[in-house]
Image: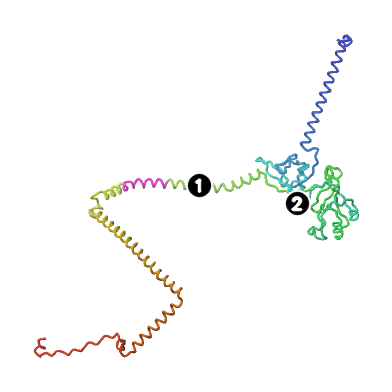
Amino acid sequence: MALQDLTPQLRTRLSRMERAVGWFVLLATALLLFGFAYYAYHTAERKGWFKTRAPYFTFTQRATGLKVGDPVMLMGFEVGQITRIDAQPPDDWYFNVYVEFEIKEPYYDYMWTVGSRARITTADFLGKRVLEVTKGTNGYPTYVFNPFRELTLNEAKNLPTPEKWKLAQDIDAANTNGLNLVVPALTPLLQTNLQRIATLGRTQIRVLDTNVKRKSPTAVWDDKKGSYVKFIPKDNPAASLKANLYWLLTDESPAVTERLEELVGQVEKALPDFLSLTNQIVGALSNTFNLTSNLNTVATDARPVATNLAYISAQLREPGAFGEWLLGTNAPRQVNATVENANSIITHADTNLAAFFANLAVSLDNLAGITSNLNAQVQSNTNILGAISKAVVDADDLVQGLKRHWLLRSAFRTRTNAPAMAPTVAPRLTSPKDQEKR
């Protein structure tokens, strides 16, 4: 049916429906575009597409378990990702694999020149490895975001607010190779510091303007030069060959597959020794089995001997047995009586010894009392010893005088120990007849 064949009412209603459908399609398209933009924005925000990134690089021995897009970890957080993995040129004798990665803000603030390293560690048991960076402990920030300039000393002296400008290099004494540091980097450009720099003969210095902070890095630290240098991003086509990134030294651990290969090699080397050991164990077990079988035979043969010994011992214990026949029937009673007498003797001896020691203790106590009394008398009368000595001397003089007195002299005669001579007896006179009889 043609449109002109419709009535005016139908044509008006159809045009209204077409406008409603158009508005619906337009609204659905707008909602779809808004949802896609919202998803893209949150995805970019989650993955850090709008955040500033600082590039780094390191070297490894092997690229096993690493691939582009893998996350970079810091203290358990995902702070970036690997952007490039490539082999080194054939004439590089020191390094094998070049690994480049980026760290997003604000985590690149943890990267300092001292303490920050790149670690290649094992992630699972299937050979996967992960790149992890460590937090810096000292030194200088690897990247700075303040305007970087090179000035003469005269220009540096005329800078406004010199405390907001900082030195971008280490100033050391001449010909010391950085061993004698005079003014370290990030020191404010005060007049005293500038005078110290002037005394070293420096005419130009590198400085950072801390009044302004840029969104992207402006300078990167150069460990060889001991100063910051202008940062050239690698995405600049005109300066891609001159791009300067900060180099993090590597602590690399071998993959699990390599460790398993080493373990299998060690097992293969130790397997012959293990087999020989098992053979020796089998031989020892067989010898033990033979020994036990022989012992079983010996035990079977010795069973009648044991039975006879048991029977003989039983006969020895019974009344009228060989032992009683050998020792007599009164031997047990005599032995018991002897033991009882010995016990009584020992008991009386213990009692007598106890009484003796008790009496001895009483005597010793009395002697101690006498000596203590004598000691007390001597201590109380200091002249008693002199008096006793004088009394002994006087007694000796008295005895000596008595010895010399005429009345008592015979009582003190000196006697010898020689035996007295026996009196001589005259022989008895006998007749010749009696002598013949004798």
Determine whether 415 is above or below 122 in the image. Answer: below
Q: Nearer the viewer, mark 1 or mark 2?
A: 2
For disc 1, the marked residue is 279
Q: Which residue is rendered at x = 65% and y = 43% of the image? A: 256
Q: Which quadrant, please, contains the C terminus?
A: bottom left
Q: Which residue is rendered at x = 55% and y = 49% of the image? A: 273
Numbered mark located on residue 297 in the image: none
Q: Residues within 10 Å of mark 2 (few under 14, many from 20)?
A: few
- 431 vs 289, left or right, is left
3D distance between C-alphas at marks 1 and 2: 61 Å
Callout 1, which amino acid? Asn
Question: Residue 356: where, in percent of width, then height?
Answer: 34, 64
Whether residue 136 can be seen here: yes
Badge 1 marks a residue whose secondary structure is helix
Question: Residue 68: where, in percent of width, then height?
Answer: 75, 40
Callout 2, which amino acid? Asn
Magenta-tinted stretch: 290-306
Please report whichever mark, 1 or 2, sits nearer to the chain's N-terminal start: 2
Badge 2 marks a residue whose secondary structure is strand
For disc 2, the marked residue is 138
